[in-house]
Amino acid sequence: MKKFAVLTSGGDAPGMNAAVRAAVRKSIYHQAKIYGIRHGFLGLVQGELFPMKLSSVADIIHRGGTVLQTARSPEFLTEEGQKKAINFLQKEKIEGLVVIGGDGSFRGAQVLQKAGIATVGVPGTIDNDIPITDYTIGFDTAVNTVTDAINKVRDTATSHERIFIIEVMGRNSGQIALHAGLAGGAESIVIPETPFNLEEVCNRLMRGVKRGKLHSVILVAEGAGGGIYVGDEIKRVTRQEVRVMILGHLQRGGTPTAFDRILASRMGAKAIDLLLEDNSGQAIVSRNGRIEAVPYDELFARKKEFSWDDYHLASILAI
Ligand code: F6P
C-alpha cells in the first residue's frame, strides 16, 4: 500500500479544504494510505502527522480556512529544520507529499524533492501570483469578497459624496485589485506591476467630480504603496474628502465559491494521480480550462502573466 501525506502551507485560502478532501478521497479510492500534517512545513519539523480516513474530510468542502492548519515556518528555511523534516518523512516512510500553498511553499516542496522525497504542489493562495496557472485556489472567492465590499461601500460613498480608497491584499501582485476593480467598476486601480500615476488618478477623479459623479472608488493593492499613502496623496492634490478602507485578512476567509471548490477538487485529485504515476517534482496548474502539471523549475523560471488588456479595459470603462 502506498503511503502519502498532505499539508497546507503559507497564507490560508478558501478552497484549501476542498483540495485536502480531494487528495484524501482520491488516495483512499486508489487504496493508498493518506496522512495529514498539521501546521504546514512546521508540522514536518515537529512531526505532526496523523492518519486520515474518509470521515476526516466529511463536511469540509464548503468551509473556508484549512482544517490542517497552516503556518509560515522560519525553522523550515534553515538547513537544520529541513534535515529534521526530511528525516521525519523518511522515518515515517512517506512515499509522496502533496503541498498545498503558494510560491514559497512550492520552493519548500522542491527542497524535499531534491532530497529524494516525492512531492507535488497544488497552488492555493488568494493572490493568484503563481506563474503559468490561470487561477490559484482561493482567488475567485477573494475577488468576490472584495467585489461585495465595493458594492457596500458605494452606498455610503454616494450618500456622502466621498472618494473611497480600498486597499486589497497582494504583496507583489495586483491580481485581486485588477479583477475586483473590473467587477466592481472602480475608477482607478493602483497595482505594483506599474508605477502609481498620481496625476492621472487625480485628473480622472476631478473629471468625475465636475460631471457631478456622487462617488469614486479606487482599488489599491497592498504592494503598490498601500491605501493610506495613496489616500493621503489624493487628498493633498484634490482637496476632496477621502476615506481609506483596508480589507485585510477578511479577504482570506469565507465559504469558497463553487469555482474554487471545483478547481480545488480537480487539482487535489490530480496531485494524487501524479504521485501514483511516480511523476512528482511538479506543480499542478490550470491552463485554458485544463488541469496539467509543470516541473517546479519550469514554473520558477516564468513570471506571472498580467492581463494588461483587462487593466486598460477597466480604465476605459471608468472614463
Ligand atoms: O499570500 C497571501 C497573503 O494574503 C498576501 O496577500 C498578504 O500580503 C499576506 O498573505 C499576509 O500574510 P500574513 O497572514 O502572514 O499576515
Image (spheres, helix red, strand yellow):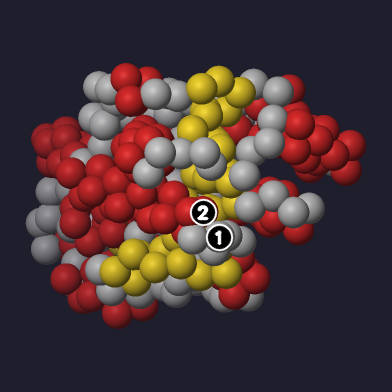
- Tell me if I can see residue 102 in this picture: yes
Residue at the far front in the pictured view: 1
Residue 301 x, y percent position in the rendering: 63, 75
Q: Secondary structure at mark 1?
A: loop
Residue 288 x, y percent position in the rendering: 28, 74
Residue 232 x, y percent position in the rendering: 48, 46
Q: Is residue 279 above or below residue 38?
A: below
Residue 217 x, y percent position in the rendering: 26, 50
Callout 1: few (<14), some (14-19), or many (20+) C-alpha neighbours within 10 Å?
few
Q: Is residue 63 left or right of residue 11?
A: left
Nearest the viewer among 135 and 207 is 135
As drawn, the label of residue 278 is 1
Q: Is mark 1 within 8 Å of ligand 1?
A: no
Q: Which residue is mark 2?
A: 275
Q: Secondary structure at mark 2?
A: helix
CB-based contact (under 8 Å), mark 1 and mark 2 = yes
Location of residue 3 (image quadrant):
top right
Which residue is pictured at 69% across the width and 30% down the height? 92
Nearest the viewer among 146 and 138 is 138
